[in-house]
């Protein structure tokens, strides 16, 4: 996971800045005197085909963001990475099923993949689950479980949430819950232990 930023930068370079080359573990501007060759999408594809999960995510995202979008290939590679345990790919696959984007809309699959991602401690998936339970989207509305997921995120991340504030949402949920329900949600939060796949 620590190389995700490098992979994402390389993917962006491949997609949007063809004058970049790959040199070892970093992307550098093209230099005619460079002894490194252009890093190509084909190299990522080779790595993805050999089972490199992070390369599978980069390939999936490249297919998803290219113009024209190749949704079938994107889903294929997100699926491979998700089955290999990548929490971001699991969340993306869950979103595809939730929205019926490129696949038949399937709430069960959406919840399964989002839950797998959240269970690994991936805060973005935990926020997604919190909203799903809060709104009753793909799952029965359950403010206790919504509180649980927002509470876990609030306690375990220092991310700057530009689109939501898990602490504020959790605190607002308290107005909808009894004291016993809040105690139950807090107990569920305390008992949560992330489990990594593979």
Image (cartoon, rainbow, N blue to C red):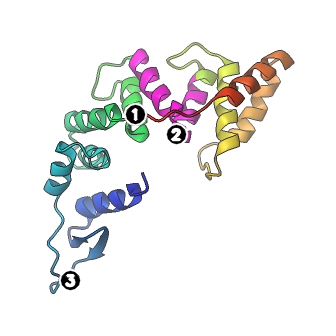
Residue under pointer 1: 90
Q: Secondary structure at mark 2?
A: loop
Which secondary structure is most common in the magenta stretch?
Answer: helix
Q: In front here: 9 or 196?
A: 196
Task: Judge the density around disc 3: few (<14), some (14-19), many (≥20) Cα neighbours within 10 Å.
Answer: few
Residue at image coords 40%, 33%: 90
Residue 31, disc:
3
- Secondary structure found at label 1: helix
**Quarter of the image where one finds residue 31:** bottom left
Crowd class of label 2 (few under 14; some 14 to 19; many from 20; radius 10 Å): many
Q: CA distance from mark 2 to mark 1?
A: 10 Å
For the C terminus, the quadrant is top left
How far apart marks 2 and 3 lie (CA) works out to 38 Å
Looking at the rendered structure, which numbered label has been put on residue 122?
2
Depth order, front residue of 184/161:
184
- Answer yes or no: is residue 13 visible: yes
Q: Position of residue 191 (x, y in %)?
A: 68, 27
Asked if disc 2 and disc 3 are in contact, CB closer than 8 Å, the reply is no
Residue 135: x percent and y percent?
60, 22
Question: How many angstroms separate mark 1 from mark 3 (CA)?
Answer: 38 Å
Write the residue at 47% across / 35% down. Answer: 196
For this orientation, the residue located farthest to the bottom is: 33
> With respect to residue 61, does 137 lie above or below?
above
Q: Which residues are magenta?
A: 107-132
Q: Is residue 165 left or right of residue 16?
A: right
Mark 2 or 1 closer to N-term?
1
Please tell me which of labels 2 and 3 falls first in the chain. Answer: 3
**Residue 133: x and y, percent?**
60, 21
Q: Is residue 107 left or right of residue 54?
A: right
Residue 165 appears in the figure:
no
Residue at the spot 69% in from the left edge and 41% down from the top edge: 154
């Amino acid at each position: 996971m620590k190389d995700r930023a490098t992979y994402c930068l390389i993917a962006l370079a491949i997609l949007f800045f063809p004058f970049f080359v790959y040199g070892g573990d970093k992307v550098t501007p093209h230099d005619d005197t460079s002894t490194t060759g252009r890093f190509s999408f084909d190299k990522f594809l080779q790595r993805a085909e050999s089972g490199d999960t992070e390369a599978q995510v980069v390939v999936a995202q490249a297919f998803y963001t290219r113009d024209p979008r190749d949704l079938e290939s994107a889903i294929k590679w997100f699926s491979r990475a998700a089955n290999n345990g990548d929490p971001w790919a699991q969340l993306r696959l869950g979103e595809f099923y939730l929205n019926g984007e490129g696949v038949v809309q399937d709430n069960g699959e959406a919840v399964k993949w989002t839950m797998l991602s959240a269970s690994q401690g991936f805060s973005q998936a935990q926020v997604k689950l919190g909203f799903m339970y809060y709104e009753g989207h793909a799952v029965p509305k359950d403010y206790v479980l919504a509180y649980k997921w927002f509470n876990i995120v609030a306690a375990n991340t220092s991310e700057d949430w530009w689109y939501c504030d898990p602490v504020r949402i959790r605190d607002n949920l308290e107005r909808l819950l009894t004291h016993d329900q809040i105690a139950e949600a807090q107990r569920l939060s305390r008992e949560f232990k992330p489990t990594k796949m593979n």
